[in-house]
Image (cartoon, rainbow, N blue to C red):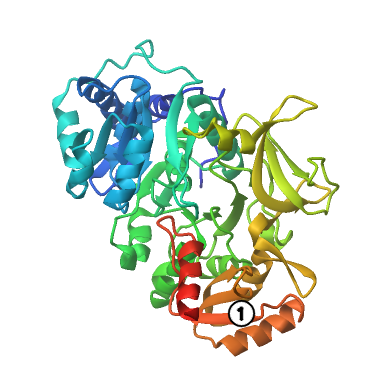
Amino acid sequence: MSAAAPQIAEPAKLVPALLDRAAAARPEVIAVHGSDGALTYGELARLSWAARTWFAEQGVAPGDRVAIQATGRGVMVAALFGCLRLGAVAVPFSPELTPYQLSYLLADTKAAMLIGDDRDRAAQRAVASATIDGLAAGLAAVRPAALDASAPGPAPGDLALLLYTSGSTAQPKGVTCTHAQICFAAGAVAQRVAYRPDDVVFCRLPLSFDYGLYQVFLSAIAGCTLVLAEAGQDTDLIGQLARHQATVVPLVPSLATMLLALSARKPAASQQLRIRLFTNTGEHLPPATADALRARFPGSGVQMMFGTTECKRITVADVDAYLTRPGSVGRALPGTEVRIVGPTGDPLPPGEIGEICVTGPHLMEGYWNAPELTAQRYRRDVRTGERVLHTGDFGRMDADGQLYFEGRRDQLFKLRGVRVSTTEVEAAAAALPGVRTVAMLPPAADREAILCVAGEVTDDDVLRRLRELLGPAKAPPRCRVLSAIPLTRNGKVDRSRLEQMMQENET
């Protein structure tokens, strides 16, 4: 029998407290299983204190930024918590960053230290550095700081994380996150997703992506096991899920499509898996894909969520609520509020489309070294004085407080005089037989709107079927069938690259 979801205790105010609570309650339970082996909660806590000592010995001081390569290793998780225990600011970065991108990140953050690998040697010359292996050896050699809650450390309002978004702008933006904001966001999400103490959370998402990173915090709150998927082993995902007896799988659409393709090759093995929950945020999961997951993995449910790095999560739906409330991404987190506002900033009634705005303690501090952008996105309500995040995303709310995402400002457009959202067209196209992945590009100055699909279909067939599903007015005027849709490091559609591909095709 599965264990009940844990009661949520008084919210933590410091991120390391999430680990300390789990270590005190369940010290022998496996906390994280990475490519370097398994660590119990007790071991992870002790290793994080060793990391605190090691960082201090390297000259890292409270407030300093530490760039940490987000590998799938337990020592990286220990380093993260150790950095935060010291009061330094962790900056997780993807192993796939190019030297140019990494150099930009180090310069933008004025990092005091870099934990990377041999590939990062050019950037390492600019700051104090160590490899992941060197970090592991260093932690084994130092005397850990005393497990003493009174040891000097951060305050709840101090910065803990700098999370760089993977947006389509020329350079990524660093979102600044305090301990208190992270703890509130993680605790509020935990109440809705309700991970259980006996869960095994299988994380294939990169830990440089906040959706992946927060699996560390959510697993600690539940006291369950987090498995960091083995890099370069995607063809064996079904085998990994079976070996670890995974019960929860956070995913984006590209990962869902991969799992479905792999499970089709091993249907018997897939039927025997213990997965009870798939969660989705980062990019909308088409209902047809959610249906396929539930059918292919018996006993599983799908929980849709919607969020942005600027406040972590905005809404969370009930499990399988997409079946009864098509298109809904759920209700606001406990202790927060979602508003739909018009061009003047006034709230709109249920059913009307406007900008999605958010208030609550989960609003992050702002953008690193970007006060003008921070002031543009994080504003004060002139009536209440509340801090309000203007997301730049558009949606509508029903009378029950359920949010329906329509797209970003540049993803809503008029087609043949009718308002169209890329989300609506993509959802319809994804449901067509033979379509694996889709991405809709709104019209630009030099071209019409164009739908890109990957799958065993023809462009004429896709357009004909969409005219039947959406009507002639909303069906896209053009369709391109590609071998694959380009993706970012986080598994989202790389719309900038896709736009470039379309431009190259026109020339």
Q: Position of residue 370 (x, y in %)?
A: 51, 35
Q: Position of residue 148 (x, y in %)?
A: 34, 13
Q: Residue at x 79, y 46 (%)?
A: 342
Q: Is residue 364 positioned above or below 439 on the image?
A: above
Query: Is disc 1 surrounded by few (<14), some (14 to 19) or many (20+) residues within 10 Å?
Result: some
Q: Position of residue 228 (x, y in %)?
A: 34, 49
Q: Secondary structure at mark 1?
A: loop
* Residue furthest to the right: 349
Q: Is residue 207 positioned above or below 81 on the image?
A: below
Judge left or right: residue 361 versus residue 130.
Answer: right
Judge left or right: residue 360 versus residue 240.
Answer: right
Q: Quadrant of residue 88?
A: top left
Nearer to us in this view, 416 or 28? 416
Q: Residue at x 49, y 62 (%)?
A: 496
Q: Is residue 316 visible?
A: no
Q: Quadrant of residue 386?
A: top right
Q: Which residue is mark 1?
A: 432
Judge left or right: residue 289 versus residue 491.
Answer: right
Q: Amino acid at mark 1?
A: Leu
Q: Is residue 160 positioned above or below 483 on the image?
A: above
Q: Is residue 446 visible?
A: yes
Nearer to us in this view, 358 or 42? 358
Judge left or right: residue 87 versus residue 460.
Answer: left
Q: Position of residue 167 (x, y in %)?
A: 49, 52
Q: Residue at x 32, y 51 (%)?
A: 97
Q: Quadrant of residue 269?
A: bottom left
Instruction: Count all numbered tags in the image, as a single digit.
Output: 1
